[in-house]
Amino acid sequence: MRLYDPNQAALQALSGSNIEVMVGVPNSELSYVAASRDNSFDWVWNNIMTYPDVKFRYISVGNEVKPSDGTLAPLVYSALTNIREVVVFYGLGNQIKVSTSIDTTLIGANYPPSQGAFKDEVRAYIDPIIAFLVANNAPLLVNVYPYFSYADNPVDISLAYATFTSPGIVVQDGALGYQNLFDAIVDVVYSALEKAGGPWVEIVVSETGWPSAGASAATFDNARTYLRNMVAHARWGTPKRPGRAIETYLFAMFDENNKEPQIEKNFGLFYPNQTTKYSLYFNSIQKGFESI
């Protein structure tokens, strides 16, 4: 399960559950943990060490920080290194990996997937982060949304390609064939990592989902189709990484009725009153990849 901030009630509920947790250092707290190691000790003590019965898997230091953000972007690397040093100090360096979540707007070239590359203007931001991940054998957390790619370009991208229902190969990239957009996006980022000094960095899909209302193609049926097929597909890997299950976190547990704009209200697997929107089946997926 992914928590975007160390919500104390949620962490207490997860204690002893055996559910592995990705917990976030919110963007609003980056300045605090980046400022000093003492502050990072304070953060880790209050939000990790205080919960010895929670199985922490990752700490995501920031979410979708824009490299152009002159306030937040300069904080991410320092925050990463400070949190990592504290995690290692407490003897948890092998158990808890420290990373950050990016979105795919950092990608420039994206077609075909083998040509994937980060934009030149983001390299000063992302390259040190990639070097950090390489040095610490940590994955890059990537938020992957075929929905938005499809919604932005329905002329060139088919709904079937975006929802894992295409009957055959849609994009041929050398020896690799792509039957769905999700794989193509993930492999674009793998190609970008290769070109930026991180050929062995794994990708964890830290968000993916499909809205059930609120905009074009945001329907109950499309969302259910995407999510069910995503769950079934995750264990197979991508054409660049075949046979290696894609650790994937579905966004989100609940519809968020107070969010804006309208589309952002409708990504949940459950309604705000906790009733199920659609059923998903995880039995075929390896333990550790059943994340919602």
Image: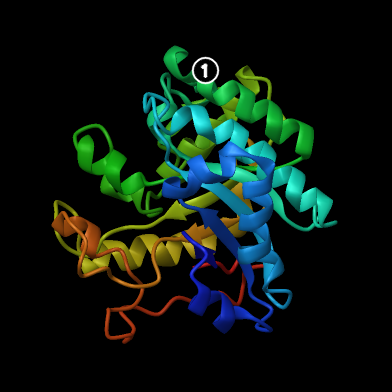
Q: Quadrant of the N terminus?
A: bottom right
Q: Nearer the viewer, residue 11 or 127?
A: 11
Q: Residue furthest top?
A: 120
Q: Which residue is mark 1?
A: 123
Say whether residue 141 is left or right of residue 151: right
Q: Position of residue 83 (x, y in %)?
A: 67, 46
Relative vertical location of residue 68 with respect to residue 64 in this rendering, above or below: above
Numbered-mark total: 1
Say whether residue 264 is left or right of residue 78: left
The residue sitting at 68% across, 37% down in the picture is 81
Indicate the amino acid at tag 1.
Arg
Q: Nearer the viewer, residue 66 or 205?
A: 66
Q: Is residue 287 shown to the viewer in this render?
A: no
Rendered image quadrant of residue 198: top right
Q: Position of residue 67 (x, y in %)?
A: 42, 26
Q: Position of residue 134 (x, y in %)?
A: 74, 32
Q: Is residue 159 shown to the viewer in this render?
A: yes
The residue sitting at 47% across, 37% down in the picture is 184
The residue sitting at 61% across, 33% down in the picture is 78
Q: Secondary structure at mark 1?
A: helix
Say whether residue 167 is left or right of residue 30: left
Relative vertical location of residue 277 with respect to residue 190 in this rendering, above or below: below
Q: Position of residue 30 (x, y in %)?
A: 50, 43
Relative vertical location of residue 80 with respect to residue 248 in this rendering, above or below: above
Rendered image quadrant of residue 288: bottom right
Q: Nearer the viewer, residue 78 or 250?
A: 78
Q: Residues within 10 Å of mark 1 (few under 14, many from 20)?
A: some
The residue sitting at 49% across, 21% down in the picture is 118
